[in-house]
């Protein structure tokens, strides 16, 4: 496929050309879309720090006396939260026991220094006495392909992984384990190359954030 990104229609066509079924079953365009989007999610799930899934310095506003701000709907995980109003890096509250240790009354006010992720909202502690602007870095969920002109965010030189992943899934559904294993091996080789290219130099710059609430 080279270095040029291809759109959904082209990916569907390539998959259809490469798919060989002894029963002459034809995979529809909508099913290829499903398989390709599943392959995108497989690649995305292989690491939380793919660079094309990073979003930086997204502004979130929290009003005075309120604890919550609305996060983008495509958020998967937070990587950093900066209180730009008070110019400080915030730290996550790891669990309910820690929250109760720090804020036993649940009504403490001051400069927000802690946060907790709750669905698509962020909760800050203590309650801000003034309107507060946060800058949020996060990992986003991958975007599904839907229109024929949509292009995957994965770099062009590795988009072959999406084709191999889609063919693997198609052959699994077709009860053809031999061909499924062939394309699984191809997919895994490309994924290994992606990890070597993108994750090796980056892994030591990221630290896990435990946002569980227990």
Image (cartoon, grey):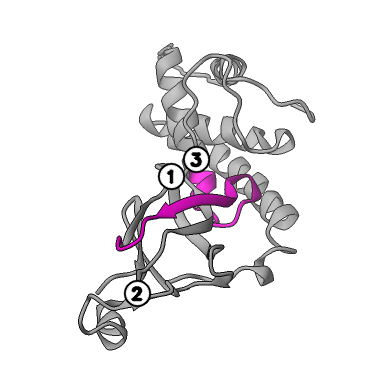
| Residue ranking furthest to the bottom | 101
User: Tags 3 and 2 in contact by the CB under 8 Å rule?
Assistant: no
Relative to 186, 140 lies left or right: left
- Name the quarter where the N terminus is drawn: top right
Q: Position of residue 169 (x, y in %)?
A: 44, 34
**Neighbourhood count class around disc 3 (C-alpha, 10 Å): few under 14, some 14–19, many 20 upward:** many
**What separation in Å lies between label 3 and label 2 (alpha carbons)?**
33 Å
Mark number displayed over residue 169: none
Which region is colored magenta?
Answer: 42-66
How many dots with numbers?
3
| For residue 175, above or below residue 9 | below
Secondary structure beneath disc 2? loop
* Residues tagged 3 and 1 counted as in contact (Cβ below 8 A): no
Marks 1 and 2 sit apart, C-alpha to C-alpha, by: 22 Å
User: Would you name the residue on which mark 2 appears?
Assistant: 126
Q: Is residue 204 above or below residue 187?
A: below
Q: Earlier in the sequence, mark 1 or mark 2?
A: 1
Quadrant of image for the C terminus: bottom left
Residue in the picture at 76% in, 26% down: 4
**x 71%, y 50%: residue:** 193
Q: Which residue is mark 1?
A: 72
Q: Secondary structure at mark 1?
A: loop
- Cα–Cα gap, marks 3 and 1: 13 Å
| Residue hosting label 3 | 142
Q: Nearer the viewer, mark 3 or mark 2?
A: 2
> Quick check: can you spot residue 43?
yes
In-front residue for pair 140/25: 140
**In front of the other: label 1 or label 2?**
2
x and y percent of residue 8 in the render?
56, 19
Q: Nearer the viewer, residue 194 or 129?
A: 129
Please tell me whether mark 3 sits on a helix, a strand or a loop: loop
């Amino acid at each position: 496929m080279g270095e040029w990104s291809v759109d959904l229609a082209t990916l569907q066509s390539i998959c259809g050309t490469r798919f060989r079924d002894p029963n002459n079953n034809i995979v529809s365009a909508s099913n290829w879309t499903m398989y390709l989007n599943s392959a995108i999610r497989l690649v995305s799930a292989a690491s939380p720090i793919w660079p094309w899934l990073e979003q930086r310095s997204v502004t979130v506003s929290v009003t005075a006396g309120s604890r919550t701000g609305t996060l983008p709907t495509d958020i998967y995980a937070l990587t950093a939260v900066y209180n730009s109003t008070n110019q400080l890096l915030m730290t996550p509250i790891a669990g309910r026991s820690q929250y109760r240790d720090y804020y036993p009354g649940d009504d403490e006010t001051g400069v927000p220094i802690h946060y907790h992720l709750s669905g698509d909202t962020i909760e800050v502690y203590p309650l801000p006495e003034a309107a507060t602007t946060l800058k949020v870095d996060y990992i986003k969920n991958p975007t599904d392909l839907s229109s024929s002109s949509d292009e995957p965010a994965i770099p062009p030189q590795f988009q072959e992984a999406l084709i191999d992943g889609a063919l693997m899934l198609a052959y699994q559904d077709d009860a053809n384990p031999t061909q499924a294993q062939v394309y699984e091996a191809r997919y895994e080789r490309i994924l290994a190359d992606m990890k070597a290219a993108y994750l090796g130099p980056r892994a030591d710059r990221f630290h896990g954030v435990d946002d569980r609430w227990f």
